[in-house]
């Protein structure tokens, strides 16, 4: 027999070993309980953000050249008072053959301010009905039952609890097999403990809108690499299965009386020097800037003399560096990216060959 001290050590080691063995199956179940909810994770996915879905020949050609078979389609816009502003229409299905559409509902954050449980119940029921309606009307594209659905909402600390409650209620009104996803902003990705982890099955990290859009002096509010690095610095894996999205959109920000006035979803040709005066930029690669010197209409908006314009888009070089940074994250490297958003402009300006390099190249392949 051993000494009293030796027996005590043996008992402690035995209890530790027993606890370890008992917890092992649980740990394995926890790990296995997070399934790969993304079909074809090695193929890209596009967001289509117009509520009238009508693919052009060029848009469909880009999808085909990238072997893209899944498209995230916005089916409903919900405003700040939880009112429906727009719903999906598909006037022509000619170029949808072979595609699988996955529905997304955009909800303004203010919709979750001061909402009662009864109001959240009604909202969740209405949105579940919208998801099911897409499957009923266009089953050949959405499937007979929605397999995956997404909610796009930039929740804040003041709306977090209400938004999360809404997600829980929504889940109860969806088919049992339907996976519920959310879009995730970079600040939420960086600080899941502080911002909360949504009760969802998966998330798509929107790796853009990093700058202060209201600040005229901002270099580029869509994406700046120094900002992206800060969001990705020193953090562990996010608790939900993830994909990541890069910005392929462009826009012109209009500033009036020192405030952001309008967003024009294009970088129109501003070469008419009788109406627009170029403003010198401080460094190569920064956004083009103009001052309106003669009143004119652009995209339905009247621009007055004195209005300031900043045209923002992301260069291929910046996109590649952003993709490399995102792929260096252990919870993001496994899947191909998503792209926001598919339209005539992005289809005309981006080739499949260039976009595929964003996730297929190895570091050092492009200089």
Image (cartoon, rainbow, N blue to C red):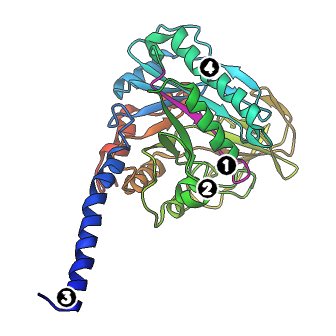
- Image quadrant assignment for residue 49: top right
Residue position for label 4? 130
**Sequence-wise first label, 4 or 1:** 4
| Quadrant assignment for the N terminus | bottom left
Type of secondary structure dominating the magenta stretch: loop
Q: Is residue 291 magenta?
A: no
Could you tell me if residue 54 is visible in this image? no
The image shows residue 199, relative to residue 191, as above or below, that is above
Q: Secondary structure at mark 4?
A: helix
Q: Nearer the viewer, residue 269 or 61?
A: 61
Circle 3 Cα neighbour tier, 10 Å, few/some/many (<14 / 14–19 / ≥20): few
Q: Nearer the viewer, residue 326 or 276?
A: 326
- Image quadrant assignment for residue 224: bottom right
The residue positioned 36% from the left and 29% from the top of the image is 66
The range drawn in magenta is 146-160
**Sequence-wise first label, 2 or 4:** 4
The residue positioned 71% from the left and 33% from the top of the image is 120
Circle 4 Cα neighbour tier, 10 Å, few/some/many (<14 / 14–19 / ≥20): some
Looking at the image, residue 48 sits to the left or right of residue 327; the answer is right
Q: Secondary structure at mark 1?
A: helix
The residue positioned 29% from the left and 57% from the top of the image is 364
Residue position for label 2? 195
Looking at the image, residue 266 sits to the left or right of residue 45; the answer is right
Looking at the image, residue 341 sits to the left or right of residue 310; the answer is left
* Cβ atoms under marks 4 and 3 closer than 8 Å: no
Circle 1 Cα neighbour tier, 10 Å, few/some/many (<14 / 14–19 / ≥20): some
Residue position for label 3? 6
Image coords of residue 355 (percent x, y): 40, 38
């Amino acid at each position: 027999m051993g000494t009293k001290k030796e027996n005590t050590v043996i008992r402690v080691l035995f209890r530790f070993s027993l606890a370890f063995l008992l917890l092992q199956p649980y740990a394995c179940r926890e790990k296995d309980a997070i399934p790969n909810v993304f079909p074809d994770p090695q193929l890209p996915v596009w967001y289509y953000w117009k509520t009238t879905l009508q693919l052009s020949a060029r848009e469909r050609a880009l999808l085909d050249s990238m072997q893209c078979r899944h498209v995230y389609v916005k089916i409903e816009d919900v405003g700040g008072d939880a009112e429906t502003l727009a719903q999906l229409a598909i006037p022509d299905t000619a170029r949808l053959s072979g595609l699988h559409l996955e529905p997304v509902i955009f909800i303004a954050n203010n919709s979750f301010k001061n909402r009662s449980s009864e109001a959240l119940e009604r909202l969740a029921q209405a949105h579940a009905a919208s998801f099911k309606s897409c499957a009923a009307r266009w089953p050949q594209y959405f499937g007979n039952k929605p397999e995956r659905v997404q909610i796009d909402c930039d929740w804040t600390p003041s709306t977090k609890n209400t938004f999360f409650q809404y997600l829980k209620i929504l889940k109860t009104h969806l088919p049992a097999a339907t996976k519920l996803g959310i879009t995730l902003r970079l600040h939420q990705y960086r600080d899941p403990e502080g911002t909360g982890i949504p009760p969802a099955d998966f998330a798509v990290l929107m790796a853009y809108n990093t700058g202060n859009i209201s600040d005229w002096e901002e270099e580029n509010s869509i994406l700046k690499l120094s900002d992206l690095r800060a969001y990705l610095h020193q953090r562990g894996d996010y608790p939900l299965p993830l994909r990541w999205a890069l910005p392929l959109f462009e826009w012109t920000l209009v500033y009036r009386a020192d405030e952001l006035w309008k967003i024009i979803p294009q970088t129109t040709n501003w070469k008419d020097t009788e109406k627009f005066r170029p403003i010198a930029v401080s460094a190569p690669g920064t956004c083009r800037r103009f001052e309106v010197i003669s009143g004119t209409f652009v995209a339905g908006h009247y621009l007055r003399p004195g209005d300031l314009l900043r045209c923002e888009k992301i260069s291929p070089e910046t996109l590649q560096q952003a993709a490399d940074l995102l792929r260096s994250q252990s919870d993001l490297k496994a899947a191909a990216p998503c792209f926001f958003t598919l339209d005539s402009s992005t289809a005309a300006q981006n080739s499949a060959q260039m976009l595929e390099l964003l996730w297929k190249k190895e570091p050092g392949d492009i200089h």
